[in-house]
Image (tube, grey):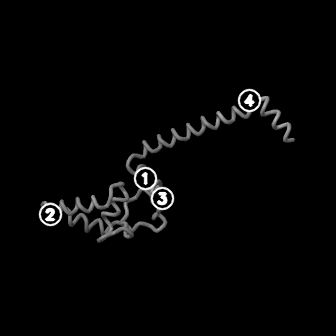
Amino acid sequence: MNTPRTTLYKDKQNAKLMGVCAGLADYTGLDAIWWRLGMLVSTISGGFPVTLPAYLIMGLLLNHKPAHLYTEDKQEQKYWQGVRANPKRTSREIRGKLREIDRRLANVEEHFVSSNPRLDAEIERLR
């Protein structure tokens, strides 16, 4: 499942330096400040030989986030973060919601199809 919505991108719109931390934040759902603090603490506490080159490599290799993926809808962002984190759980949730909608629709259909003398009289009056 490598669609544009499930790919890691650099987020230049919310970037401070190269957009790597903002892209990781968008991808994982964690706030960008936590990614930035983690990078800073890792770099200061001795992870400099790994953290900085990894950041630079990601900054050079990751693609920019396409303009059509920038959305203001927080619910949609949460949905796609859930898909990236656990696609099976997301599909189970959607299947459950569709079953609930189907059940409710069946109840409505049963109500209107069943013999309801009051409803029949009202329909006849409207004709």
Q: Residues within 10 Å of mark 3 (few under 14, many from 20)?
A: few
Q: Nearer the viewer, residue 110 or 117?
A: 117
Specify the amino acid type for callout 4.
Ser
Specify the amino acid type for callout 3.
Asp
Q: Check the picture and name the quadrant holding the C terminus.
A: top right
Q: Name the quadrant containing residue 108.
A: top right
Q: Residues within 10 Å of mark 1 (few under 14, many from 20)?
A: some
Q: CA distance from mark 1 to mark 2?
A: 32 Å
- The earlier-in-sequence mark between 4 and 3 is 3
Q: Secondary structure at mark 2?
A: helix
Task: Indicate the position of residue 55 as horizontal and vertical percent values.
Answer: 25, 65
- The earlier-in-sequence mark between 3 and 1 is 3
The disc placed on residue 73 is 3
The residue wearing badge 1 is: 78
Task: Indicate the position of residue 122 as horizontal and vertical percent values.
Answer: 81, 36
The residue wearing badge 2 is: 44
Answer yes or no: do the residues labelled 1 and 4 have beta carbons within 8 Å?
no
Specify the amino acid type for callout 2.
Ile
- The earlier-in-sequence mark between 1 and 4 is 1
Q: Residues within 10 Å of mark 2 (few under 14, many from 20)?
A: few
Specify the amino acid type for callout 1.
Lys
Q: Is residue 108 above or below residue 26?
A: above
Q: Nearer the viewer, residue 16 or 52?
A: 16
